[in-house]
Amino acid sequence: MERLYQNISKRKSTRKFNMDSLDPSSMERVEQALQDIPQLFENLTVSFILVRDGEHFMEKGTSILGAYTKVKSPHYLVVACKEASGFRQAAGYSMAHVLLKLNDLGIATCVTYPGVDLMTIQQFAPLEEEEVPILFIAFGNPEDPLSLYPKPDYYKRRSYKDILLQGPVKRKYKFILEAARLAPSSFNTQPWRFAVDGHKIHLLRVKLGFIKSKLFSSLNKIDMGLALGFMVIALKSKEMKFRLVKDPVAYEGMEYMITIEMKE
Ligand SMILES: Cc1cc2nc3c(=O)[nH]c(=O)nc-3n(C[C@H](O)[C@H](O)[C@H](O)COP(=O)(O)O)c2cc1C
């Protein structure tokens, strides 16, 4: 987990890929990295199905959100899961590990939402029965090798003042929130908020107004899973003992997700 943790501050999205396929040994390392991905729920497996021919796959995309969602890359992973309760958060949690593992291999990534129809997905990446595609991870070598890692001051993220509903945060727990703060999110919306009460960190999501579409709240649930994944990776890298529990707190305009309870 130490290596994944280090990659939290070395990861960024890449949108310009070198369209050459990865060399076979790199591809093998990707396939190895996809073995035993941590899951948020024991009985809900999030799958990462490899699309080797990314160029033809993406050609079939009819994006509803315009150019932002159409990131062209030589390969993709289709993130898929059964539609059970909490499946979007579960997808984000597992994706956090995959994004950081690929980054650690020096492979560039970008989460995308290209609007490829189910029939095409089934052709390129057969899904298991009951699995639905949730998102895609574009990956490969970046067009500019120097763009793989973020430059200083790259991250445009909300300040603690914005994301902390309640504090104070003990100094020894600050790194946990910092890991979440650097997580990627759809349109960089960073929907996560935290209420810290002693050794408990409650995670909440900003509820979207009526006008914002269903799509955005679905994406924000994935973002919450990503933030939780980054926090758990941070905790595990420091070998801190904790439990994930339900201990709801109420804040106006927020949806409670989960609590990280530290064992002191
Ligand atoms: C659920 C999700 C969906 C995303 N969809 C897209 C997308 O369709 N196109 C894109 O270019 N970036 C997409 N992104 C990447 C975000 O825009 C990016 O993570 C955010 O701007 C923060 O930048 P960073 O990843 O470089 O830290 C997505 C990220 C997440 C987590």
Image (cartoon, rainbow, N blue to C red):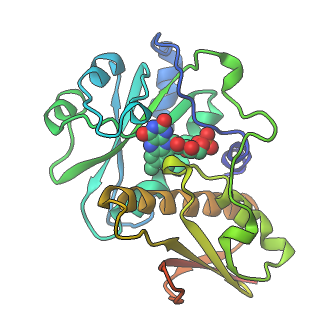
Q: Is residue 244 left or right of residue 82?
A: right
Q: How many marks?
A: 0
Q: Is residue 122 visible?
A: yes
Q: Is residue 131 left or right of residue 68?
A: left
Q: Is residue 47 left or right of residue 142?
A: left
Q: Position of residue 141 (x, y in %)?
A: 56, 19
Indicate the quadrant containing the C terminus: top left, top right, bottom left or bottom right.
bottom right
Residue drawn 69% across and 69% down?
A: 162
- Residue 18 lies, with reference to residue 50, above or below; the image says above
Q: Position of residue 23 (x, y in %)?
A: 50, 12
Q: Is residue 35 visible?
A: no
Residue drawn 13% across and 34% down?
A: 119
Q: Position of residue 35 (x, y in %)?
A: 45, 42
Q: Residue furthest front?
A: 211
Q: Quadrant of residue 208?
A: bottom left
- Residue 16 lies, with reference to residue 48, above or below; the image says above
Q: Is residue 160 left or right of residue 124?
A: right
- Residue 101 lies, with reference to residue 167, above or below; the image says above
Residue drawn 35% across and 21% down?
A: 54
Q: Nearer the viewer, residue 152 or 10?
A: 152
Q: Residue furthest right?
A: 171
Residue drawn 44% across and 22% down?
A: 73
